[in-house]
Image (cartoon, coloured by chain):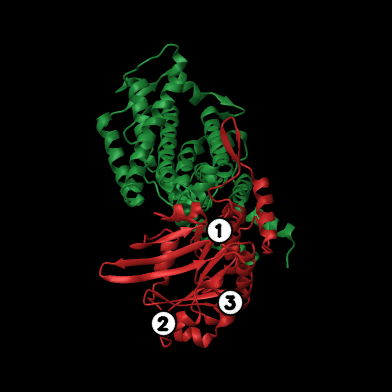
Amino acid sequence: MISPFQRALIEFALDNLVWFMLVFVLAIFSLTIPNFFQIGIFANIVEQSTFVGVMAIGLAIVIIAGHMDLSVESVAALSAMITGILFCSHGIGQGYTLTPAWLVIPVAALIAIFVGGVIGAMNGWLVVKLQMNAFIVTLASYIWVRGLVVAISGGRSAQDLAPPLRFIGIETMGFIPLIAWIAIICFVVFTFIMGRTPFGRHVTMIGGNAVATFRAGIKVDQLVLLTFVLAGAIAGLAGLLLAIRTSGATANLGTGMLFNAFAAVVIGGVSLKGGVGRLPGVYAGVLLLSSIHTAINLMGLPAHYTQVILGALVLAAVLLDTVKLSIKQMLA
Amino acid sequence: MTVETPLLRLENITRNFGAIDALRGITFDIHRGEVVALLGDNGAGKSTLVKIIAGGLQPTSGTMVFEGRQRSFSSPAEAKAAGIETVYQDLSLCTNVDVVANFFMGREIVKRYFGIPVLQEAEMQAAAAQAIANAGTKIPSLRINVEHLSGGQRQAIELNRFVHWGGKLVLLDEPFAALGVEQTRRGLDMVKRIAAQGIGVVIITHIMAQAFQVADRIVVIRHGKVAGNVRTKNTSPDEVVRMITGEALEAAAQEMRPNGPQLVQ
C-alpha cells in the first residue's frame, strides 16, 4: 500500500502532467537547439500562445460542460473584422476616432466581446432550447460566420488600427507583450471561476452528469447557454487581440486556429466526454504547441512538419489520458 | 396508545395509461422511521406507484396525505422540496467530482467577496465529514472523485446527503441490484440506520431475503392493487410469495393481516 502522501504526490503529478511535459520539452529544446535558450524566444512563445490560448479558454469551458463549439475561430475573425472596419484607417477601415483617443480600447473590447457573445448566445439557444446537436449547430456557425466575415469585408482587408490599440500590441512588460499578459490574466480569472465559484462547479458537474445536476435543482439549461455565450465572448476577445497584433483584419484571419485550440484543449487534459479538465493545463497545452512551432522554425525544418507533429501530439495526449485514468483507478 | 399520523397516507390511488389500469386503488400508510418493502411481480405497478409518490407521475384519482396535509406533486422537484426523494443508483451523483462537491450539489456554501460567490471548501468538507461520520459510513477520502468509489459507497453518499438535507421519505428502487454480498449487507444496515433517524423508507426489491432482513412491513402489489400489507414479523416468505402470485385470496390476506401497524397494536 502507498501512503496518503505518496498518493497525493502521484495525483499532483498526474493532474499537472502537461506542465511537466512542457518543462521537459523546453529543457530538451534548450539543450539541443542552438540559440533556443534565450529570453526573447521564451517571450515569443508566450506571445504566440495569446490568440489560441484565449480562444481555447472558451472552447474548454464548453467542452467541460459536455458540449462543443466549433465556431470560435470564425467568431474571432468576425470580431476582428468588425473592430478592423470600425477603427482602422486604411483599406476598408472607416477610421472612427474617439475623444479622448484611449477610449477606443474599452469601446473596441466591448464591441468585440459583444459580437462574440451574440453568436455564442445563438449557438447556445439552438442547442438548449431546440435540443439541436452542438457539433452541428456550431459547425454551421463556423461556416456562416466566416462567410459573413468575407461578405462584410468584400474579401478585402482593413489596415492601420487606431494607435491606442496598437500600443497594446507593441508594448511589453517584463519582456512579455501586453497582449500576452491579457491572455495570462484571462487564464487566471477563468481558472478561478471554474475552480472556486458555484458557476464553475456546476458547469463541471453538468459535464459529468447533467441528469443528476438537474435533479439537484441546478439550472442546467441556463448554465449551458451561458457557457456558449462565454465561449463566444472570449473568442471575440481573441479576435480583438488578433486584430491588434496584426494591426488590422483580413477575411481569412485566424484560419486553422480552431484546430490548434482543439489540440491544446485535448493536450491540456480536457476530456471531450465532458466534466474533466482544468484551464491551467490548457494554457500549458497552448505553450507546448507554441514551443514546438518555435523549435521547428529555429531548426529550419519546413513548416509543414508542424502539422504532422501536432497530430501525433494530440494522439499521444489522448493515449496518455487513458494511461492516467488507469493509474488513478489503481490508486483508488 | 395514541395513533400517530402517518408520514404518508395513500388513499385509493389509481392511474391509467389509456385503457390500461396500472393502479386500481392503492391504499396504505408509511410511518416515520419505518421501512416498507414494496413487493410484486413485474408489471404489478410498483414502479408506477413509486413515481407517483415521488412526483414523477400524477395519479388519475385518489389522494396523498403527506405529514397530515393533502398534497399533489406536479414534479419530482416539488416532491423533493417537501422531503420525498427517489434515490437511484448513479443517477443522482456526478462521478467526475469529489464527495464533498456531490454532497453539496446545488447547495454549495459560498461567501461573497465584492459580490462574487466563492466556494467555501473547508467549511463544506467539515460539514460533509460530520454528516457522513454521524451516519457511520466509511469513505476513504472526501476529496476523492466519486468515480473511484464502490457502488455501496456511492449509495451511502446519496442516502447521507438525502438525510443531511432534511429528507423525510426516501424511495429506493432495487437499491442493491448491482452490489455484492458484503456491500448489500452494509447497504441494508444503512437503511436501518436511516430509518432509525425517523425517516420513512420505501424499498422496492425482488429479493425476498432482503425484504425480510430490512423491512418492518411488507406491502405486496398485485394487478395494481394492494394484495397484502403485513408486518414482517407476522408473516413468512412463503406467505408473501403466495400474495405475489395471487395464490392467497386477496380478501383473505387483507382480513388475516389488517391494515398497518396502528391496527395491530
Q: How many marks?
A: 3
Q: Answer few, some or many: residues within 10 Å of disc 2's Cα (few below 14, many 20 plus, some between 14 and 19).
A: some
Query: Do the numbered discs 2 and 1 sit on residues whose CB atoms are within 8 Å?
Result: no
Give the alpha-carbon distance from disc 1 to disc 3, as whole Å: 28 Å
What chain does mark 3 sit on? B
Who is closer to the viewer here, B52 or B228? Answer: B228
Can you give x and y, in whole percent of width and height, for residue B129 in the image?
Answer: 68, 55
Q: What residue sits right under mark 2 in the picture?
A: B250
At a point 51% along the width and 47% down the height, the residue shown is A202
Who is closer to the viewer here, B178 or A139? Answer: B178
Secondary structure under the numbered disc 3 in the rendered image: loop
Q: Report whether mark 1 lies on the same chain as mark 3.
A: yes
Q: Is A22 left or right of A205, judged from the image as shown?
A: right
Q: What residue sits right under mark 1 in the picture?
A: B168
Q: Amino acid at mark 3?
A: Gly
The vertical placement of B260 against B5, above or below, is: below
Can you give x and y, in whole percent of width and height, for residue A218 in the image?
Answer: 48, 48
Who is closer to the viewer here, B249 or A154? Answer: B249
Give the alpha-carbon distance from disc 2 to disc 1, as whole Å: 31 Å
Secondary structure under the numbered disc 2 in the rendered image: helix
Query: Do the numbered discs 3 and 2 sit on residues whose CB atoms are within 8 Å?
Result: no
Residue A253 in view here: no
Chain B shown in which color? red
Chain assigned green: A
Give the alpha-carbon distance from disc 3 to disc 2, as whole Å: 35 Å
Q: Which mark is residue B180?
A: 3
